[in-house]
Amino acid sequence: MLNLGILAAGGIARKMAKTITSVDCGVRPYAVAARDGARAAAFAKEFGFETSYEGYDALLADPAVDVVYVATTHNFHKENVRAALEAGKHVLCEKPMTTNEKDAQELFELAKQKHLLLSEAVWTRCMPFVSALRASIESGAIGRVHLLTANMGAKLAEKERIARPELAGGVLLDFAMYTLTIADIVLGEP
């Protein structure tokens, strides 16, 4: 059983906590940290996490934490992932892990050096339809793919992280990556 620690107590962290506490997946909801200790404590109580911390450093220093889910805003992902890896924790980071390829490569190299798992939380690649789709394409059952059209709609106006550049916002790093992931799954490398 792996002890999960979550950095942040916002909306996406809540979705992860609901998921982790609703399935038997070998991961125990152990700790949550937020800048506001009261918010972290309320989150821990609501979702059955054993402990909570005010501030991320305390969670990262807890030797019982095996894996950290980074649920902060995009602009903090690189530093949060680096801190978790430096603390010897495996990391699952909400997408986008970083805002550019160079930063992502640096983090993957650090994880490799420390023999730790680092993964971006792109759930689309793990959905059951993906293996069936790949099999259909590889077998030729649907013929050669010449064109892909993919759409995803969502209300974005109220999403602060989309509109504010200082939060590393923008639709490409947040929502468009789903359609780009489908394109990569279907079409492969250019």
Image (spheres, grey):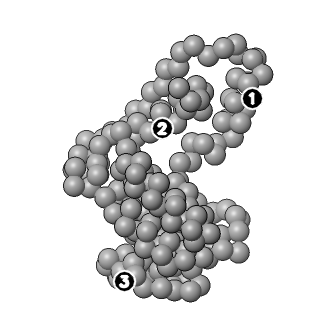
Q: Is residue 118 left or right of residue 1?
A: left
Q: Quadrant of residue 37?
A: bottom left
Q: CA distance from mark 3 to mark 2?
A: 33 Å
* 161 shown above or below 131: below
Q: Earlier in the sequence, mark 1 or mark 3?
A: 3
**What is the total number of numbered labels drawn onto the structure image?**
3
- Residue 54's disc number: 3
Please indicate, yes or no, whether residue 40 appears anywhere in the rendered image. no
Q: Position of residue 19 (x, y in %)?
A: 58, 60
Q: Quadrant of residue 66?
A: bottom right
* 31 shown above or below 156: below
Residue occupying the point 55% across, 57% down: 119
Q: Is residue 1 left or right of residue 56?
A: right
Instruction: Please state which amino acid type lies under the numbered disc 3.
Output: Glu
Instruction: Please state which amino acid type lies under the numbered disc 1.
Output: Ala
- Residue 47's disc number: none
Please indicate, yes or no, whether residue 35 appears anywhere in the rendered image. yes
Q: Position of residue 170 (x, y in %)?
A: 29, 43
Name the residue tied to disc 1.
Answer: 135
- Residue 178's disc number: 2
Instruction: Please state which amino acid type lies under the numbered disc 2.
Output: Tyr
Indicate the secondary structure of the residue bearing disc 1: helix
Q: Nearer the viewer, residue 115 or 187?
A: 115
